[in-house]
Image (cartoon, coloured by chain):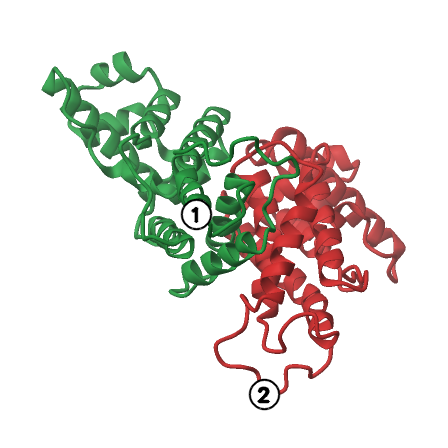
Chain colours: A green, B red
C-alpha cells in the first residue's frame, strides 16, 4: 500500500555492483522524468541521457518505455518492509495512513505519478494492482495482531479493515484531489478501528482457525 | 458522487430544441469515443463525424477537445438529483454505494473514462473535483437526516461519513481494480454507519446548531 514511495530507494547491492548501479541510475531517471514531465514525454533516449547511461544499454536491458515502467514497479516491491507495530489497531492504522498521506503529498510524488501512469498503460495498471496486493497482504498482520489481542472479533476480514482504513486517504488525495489534512490519517484509522471492534468487518463465514498466526 | 453516469442522459429540452439536440448528439459522441478509444484518440473531427454534426458547428461551439470534455462534465451535473431516502443511514449509504458501483462497473463506464481523463488534463481534473464536490454536498442531507433521527451524534461531520462510506468502493474499483463484489456496497455502508453511530466522525468543535435542518 503506502510505500510506492520506496521506489526512490536504490535497489540493494547485488553480485555485480555495476549492474545494480546502472539500474539505480536508470530507475531514478525514469522517476524524475515521470514526475517532472509525465508519461507522454517519457522516452528511452531521455531516460538514458538523464541517467548518464549509454542508450544501447537501456534498450538492451529494458527494451522500451513499458519495460522501464515495469521495472520501476518491480523496484517498488519491498519484501523487507514491515507495517508499524504500535500495540493497538488504531495506532497501527494511523501510522500506515500517515505513510500513505506522506507518499501521496510529497513533492514530485512518485506514488502519484505511478497511479497516473496506471490510467495510461495496461501493463502499468497490472503492475500497480500487483504491488498493492502485495502491500495489503504485508499489512494484514496488523489486523491479525488485533485479533490475537482480542481487540476485534476473531472472524474479522483483515483486508476489509485495511481497505476501510486507507481508502478515504487515497480517495481524498488521489480522486477528490482535496488538500492534505494533518488529521485525516488518524480520523480515518480511528473510524475503521471502531467499526472493526463493533464487528462491522466480520466475514460471513467465520474462518475455522482465524488465529492461525502471522 | 455516483451519478457521473447521469452524463449519458441527454440534457433537458430547452428553448431552441435544435441546439439542445445537437448538444446531446455531440456529448453522446464524446462519451462513446472516450469509452471506446480513450482520450488520446479524441479529436473534434472524429466527434463531429460520429455525432453527424458539421465540424464547423462543433469548432464554433466547443472550440477544442478541452471544451468538449468540460461540457461533458457540465452535463453530468444534475441539480435535480436527490440521494436515496430509505429511513436509515445504513440503507441510504448502501443505496448510494450501489449507484456508485453500478456507474463504475457498467460496460463502457463513462464515470471510469472521466476519472481516467482527469489524470490527463488539468481542466478535466478541476471539472471532476467540482462535480464531486457538488455530489457530496447533495448527499449531505443523508447524514443530516440521520442526525435529526438521533441515529448519530449531532456534531457528526457529514462529509467525513460520506467519504468513509463511499471511498472503499472507489478505491477497490478505480485504484485497486479488483472485480466488483455484490456485497461491497452494503458492507462498506454498514461499517461507516456503525462508526458514525459510535461517534467516530464527531467534529472536534461541535456545531452550534447542528440540527439546523436540511
Q: Position of residue A93 (x, y in %)?
A: 41, 52
Crowding near pointer 1: few (<14 within 10 Å), some, many (20+)?
many
Give B110 or A49, whichever is nearer the viewer. B110
Q: Hey, which quadrant is residue B154 in on the image? A: bottom right
Q: Is residue B49 left or right of residue A192?
A: right
Q: Residue at x 44, y 41 (%)?
A: A144
Tell me the subunit letter for badge 2.
B
Give B106 or B8, whichever is nearer the viewer. B106
Give B75 or A96, whichever is nearer the viewer. A96
User: Can residue B132 be seen in this snapshot?
Assistant: no
Residue furthest left in the image: A17
Q: Position of residue A58 (x, y in %)?
A: 25, 18
Q: CA distance from mark 1 to mark 2?
A: 37 Å
Q: Residue at x 40, y 52 (%)?
A: A97
Residue furthest top in the image: A60
Tell me the tag on residue A146.
1
Q: Is residue B125 left or right of residue B137?
A: left
Tell me the subunit letter for badge 1.
A
Placement of B162 over or under B7, stated as above or below = below
Q: Position of residue B13 (x, y in %)?
A: 88, 57
User: Can residue B34 be seen in this snapshot?
Assistant: yes
**Quadrant of the snapshot with the N terminus of chain B:** bottom right
Placement of B153 over or under B25, stated as above or below = below
SS at badge 2:
loop
Q: Residue at x 37, y 42 (%)?
A: A111
Q: Is residue A68 left or right of residue A160?
A: left
In the rendered image, which residue does mark 2 sit on? B208
Tell me whether marks 1 and 2 sit on the same chain: no
Q: Hey, which quadrant is residue A142 in on the image? A: top left
SS at badge 1:
helix
Amino acid at each position: 500500500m503506502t510505500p510506492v514511495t520506496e521506489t526512490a530507494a536504490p535497489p540493494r547491492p547485488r553480485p555485480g555492483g555495476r549492474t545494480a548501479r546502472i539500474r539505480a541510475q536508470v530507475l531514478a531517471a525514469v522517476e524524475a522524468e515521470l514526475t517532472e514531465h509525465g508519461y507522454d514525454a517519457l522516452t528511452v533516449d531521455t531516460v538514458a541521457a538523464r541517467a548518464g547511461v549509454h542508450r544501447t544499454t537501456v534498450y538492451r536491458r529494458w527494451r522500451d518505455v513499458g519495460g522501464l515502467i515495469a521495472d520501476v514497479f518491480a523496484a517498488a516491491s519491498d519484501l523487507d518492509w514491515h507495517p508499524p507495530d504500535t500495540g493497538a489497531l488504531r495506532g497501527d492504522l494511523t501510522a500506515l495512513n500517515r505513510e500513505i498521506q506522506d507518499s501521496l503529498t510529497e513533492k514530485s510524488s512518485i506514488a502519484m505519478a505511478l497511479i497516473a501512469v496506471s490510467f495510461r498503460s495496461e501493463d502499468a495498471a497490472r503492475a500497480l494492482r500487483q504491488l498493492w496486493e502485495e502491500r495489503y497482504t504485508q499489512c494484514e498482520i496488523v489486523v491479525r495482531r488485533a485479533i490475537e489481542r482480542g481487540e476485534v472479533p476473531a472472524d474479522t476480514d483483515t483486508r476489509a479493515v485495511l481497505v476501510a482504513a486507507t481508502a478515504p486517504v487515497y480517495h481524498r488525495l488521489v480522486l477528490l484531489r482535496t488538500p492534505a489534512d494533518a488529521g485525516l490519517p488518524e480520523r480515518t484509522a480511528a473510524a475503521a478501528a471502531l467499526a472493526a471492534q463493533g464487528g462491522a468487518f466480520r466475514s460471513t463465514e467465520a474462518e475455522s482457525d482465524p488465529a492461525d498466526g502471522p
